[in-house]
Amino acid sequence: MITAVRDAWIVTQDPRRRIIRGDVVVDGERIVSVGKGYKGTADREINASGDIVIPGLINTHTHVAMTVMKGTVDDIAFPEFLKKVFSIDSDRTDKDIDIGTKLGCAEMIRSGTTTFVDMYYSEDIIAKATMEAGIRGVLCWCVLDEEMTTQKGNPLQNCKRFYGDFKDKRKIIPGAALQGVYVCNEETCKGTKEFSDEKDIPLTFHLSETREEVNGHRKKTGKRPVEWMNDIGVLGKNAIAAHSAWVTMNEVRIMGAAGMSISSCPVSNMKLATGGVAPIPEFQKHGVNVTVGTDGSTTNNSLDLMAEMKVLGLLQKSSRWDPTVAKAQELLDYATVNAAKAIGMQDSLGSIEEGKYADLVILDGGSPNLRPLLQENMISNIIYSGSSSNVKTVMCQGDLVLENGRMNTIDEAEVLSESEEMWRSLCLR
């Protein structure tokens, strides 16, 4: 099927970061033409005159199935937060994980996200729900020491089994995840890293999220988490470290030398009041690939990456008293080209170029919050003025999952209705 998106402003995110006016033509799953007026006959025509087309956004850290726990653990101290979340997690069912995933996918679709990196157990249930929703899941099974988990069986073996079952599924990329150094010993970390290297799959983990995590690990091992993980060989090009707000300059240099990525989650860190601000300019200077994530719905409580890009920029500017850091173009890069690199899909995602997957988001150029709209102010308007309410249409790998505000995949009304019952069963105990 050939789809032609007509007469749009196209934010290509190509190497020259061109913004051009014209058509985007999709044949099946991939983009075949950008910018040039398409003279042929399309099976599907989308009139986007005056609208903005951006690449599908990529959320590099979340726990999508936790959406049905939203509003459960707000406004409490971090230790109490963890205790309550772990208690609820241990009682979850396949049904509420399915509904939570579909609810989260619907929220991400409506805010322009077409790919997300997830960290959780039961990724098999999450994968099936994600496939129904029609977006791309980089689903990283959570691995931790066997004596520390509520999973049935060995977590690493569960991760390997999940990979085997889902590695060939469309729009599903199985990955591995380490919960964090506080529940992952050296053997667990090394084994998971070896599996990631063997299969060349993403390896994500929480890293230096809180001061307590850093100090506790240093007391136990004599080393800070980044130093310890580097010394045992866990860091590398497939690694995506979430948070990384409590790191030293030496650790920043170590992370850069490893060629790894970080997923900054500013709203989560601020809401939990864990302190620390990820040193984004230093990460960039020393070669760490910077991306952005929302974290889960118990800590954010939103999966809106458009909002997260703006907050990341504002936090960096405010905390440094420097309005020149984290510029609008850089913030968009974090959620597109940089994020595609983090998951090893830079040749297929992150920009609107011929040959890449058709992951496209159409923003309503007629919205007052985006006007006046010119080529010169477009990126700034998207980042600082734009919102999820501007998202009209979303395509993921050629599939129209949202069309003029209407969900084309899951039964959104049914999911929304069931989410309340899921919340009651999990949280009113």
Image: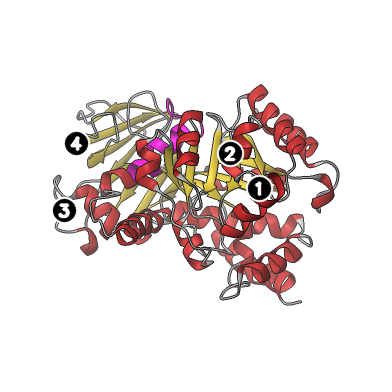
Residue 254, position in %: x, y?
50, 34
**Mark 1 against mark 4, which lies toward the viewer?**
1
Three-letter code for the amino acid on which mark 2 is drawn: Glu
In the image, what residue type sits under mark 1?
Gly
Give whichever of discs 4 and 2 has the lower sequence position.
4
Name the disc covering residue 20, or none.
Answer: 4
CA distance separating discs 1 and 2:
14 Å
Counting residues from the N terminus, which is met first, the one under dot 3 or under dot 4? 4
The secondary structure type at the circle numbered 3 is: loop
Q: N-terminal of the two: label 2 or label 3? A: 2
Q: Is residue 66 above or below residue 40?
A: below
The stretch of residues the image draws in magenta is: 332-348
Q: Which residue is mark 1?
A: 180
Read off the residue under disc 3: 373
Mark 3 and mark 1: Cα distance apart in space:
44 Å
Query: Does residue 110 appear anywhere in the picture?
Result: yes
Q: Nearer the viewer, mark 4 or mark 2?
A: 2
Q: CA distance from mark 1 to mark 4?
A: 43 Å
Answer whether residue 384 is magenta in the image.
no
Q: Nearer the viewer, residue 192 or 357?
A: 192
Query: Helix or strand or loop: what does disc 2 sit on?
Result: helix
Q: Is residue 277 above or below residue 229?
A: below
Foreground tag (1 vs 2): 2
Residue 102 horizontal/vertical position (percent)? 59, 54
